[in-house]
Every structure is written in C-alpha cells, then in structure tokens.
Image (spheres, rainbow, N blue to C red):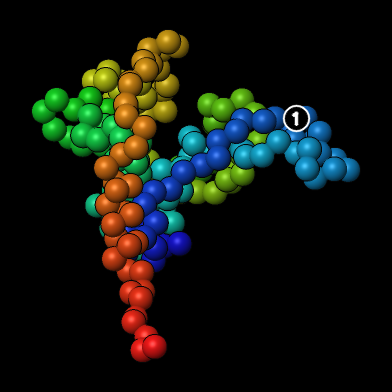
Amino acid sequence: MWGALAAGHLHTTATDHCAFCAEQKGMGRGDFSKIPNGCAGVEDRLSVLWDAGVRTGRLTPNEFVRVTSTNCAQIFNLYPRKGAVAVGSDADLVVWDPNATRTITTAGSHSKVGYNVFEGRTVTGVAKVTLSQGRIVWIDGDLRALRGAGRHIPRPAFAPMFDALQRQARAHEPHAVARPA
C-alpha cells in the first residue's frame, strides 16, 4: 500500500466511517453477515497516516497532502475549489504540527460510539487548527463546528481525472499483432 501511495498508483486513503456502537455491532452475534460494516475512524485518520506514513519515511509531506486532499478533490470533481490553496478556492485548511504527539482514546474522541479501533495508540502528527470556509472549526482539541454550517456544492458526476486514467490504461494494453494467414 505504501509503495502504491508514493508511486501514485493508489490515489487516496479513506475510512469506512460508520459510527455503529458496540450494541449495534453485536447484532451480528451468531451471524457474521448481520454485523454493520465499518467503524469510527475519520477523526484519527490523518494522524495515523502521518505517523505510519510520513514519520516512518514511507511518504513525504507533499505526498501526504496529495493523498489526503488534492487527489480527493480531483476525484470528487471539486478541484481547485477544494484541495488547493489558491485565489478563489474555499479556505479549508489544516495547520499541522508534525512533532506533536497524542494518545488516541475513546474518552478523548468526539465520536460517541463507545470504542476506538486505535485505542491506546500514540501518534506523532496532530492537527492544531482546522479552518472550514475560512472559519476556525477546530483549535487544539476544541471542536467549534456549527451544526448546519455545511453546504451542498453542485458538481459534475465525472471528473477529468477519470478520462486521464482511462487513457493511461489504454496506452498500456497489449497491441494486437497481425498474424500471417
């Protein structure tokens, strides 16, 4: 995975963030197919990726930004409104402290599912300030996001990135060789 991220073969990382509590997960006792999929993880994703990727040398800081922001915006056809720091782009920014550490705990989580798959893991690399639409929504552990402050952003269904990927795939297809009759 790390090599594919660094080489650009894997374009982004994500979580299957589904905040099902332990009681809801327990619905699958006796029948695995009834366990709701996913777990809470979006809150810790960047710190875990920085710690396991950048801090270990598997990714550069620029590659971290590419796989956590720029590529996501391109895939969802939101670039350059999102995923770029430029005039006309939304002011969605994270001030990152690459040397700060924290230990991930359920008690310190904003998700209310009652468990954390990263429980007890100490990570290096922490968001200190997060801005959304130019407004501070997170500062040193204090969540200041306002319910209802989000907005729908209309976008075309297919990003130009997919056309480029299709062209690249076709370029690598083996060419038919004419055979003598």
Residue type indicated by callout 1: Gln
Displayed quadrant of residue 128: top left
What is the residue that sits farthest to the right in this orientation? 30
Q: Position of residue 21 (x, y in %)?
A: 70, 30
Displayed quadrant of residue 145: top left
What is the residue that sits farthest to the left in this orientation? 87
Q: Residue at x 39, y 48 (%)?
A: 12
Residue 135 in view in this figure: yes
Q: Position of residue 87 (x, y in %)?
A: 11, 28
* Number of other residues with Cα within 10 Å of mark 1, as a class: few under 14, some 14 to 19, many 20 or more: few
The answer to whether residue 39 is above or below residue 166 is: above
Which residue, given by chain and number where applicable, does mark 1 sit on? Answer: 24
Residue 107 in view in this figure: no
Say whether residue 18 is left or right of residue 169: right
Q: Position of residue 25 (x, y in %)?
A: 75, 35
Displayed quadrant of residue 116: top right
What is the residue that sits farthest to the front in this orientation? 181
Please name whichever residue, 33 or 96, is drawn nearer the observer in this view of the structure. Answer: 33
Q: Residue at x 81, y 33 (%)?
A: 27
What is the residue that sits farthest to the bottom in this orientation? 180
Please name whichever residue, 137 or 68, is drawn nearer the observer in this view of the structure. Answer: 68
Q: Position of residue 178 (x, y in %)?
A: 34, 82
Q: Residue at x 34, y 61 (%)?
A: 169
Q: Residue at x 29, y 32 (%)?
A: 78
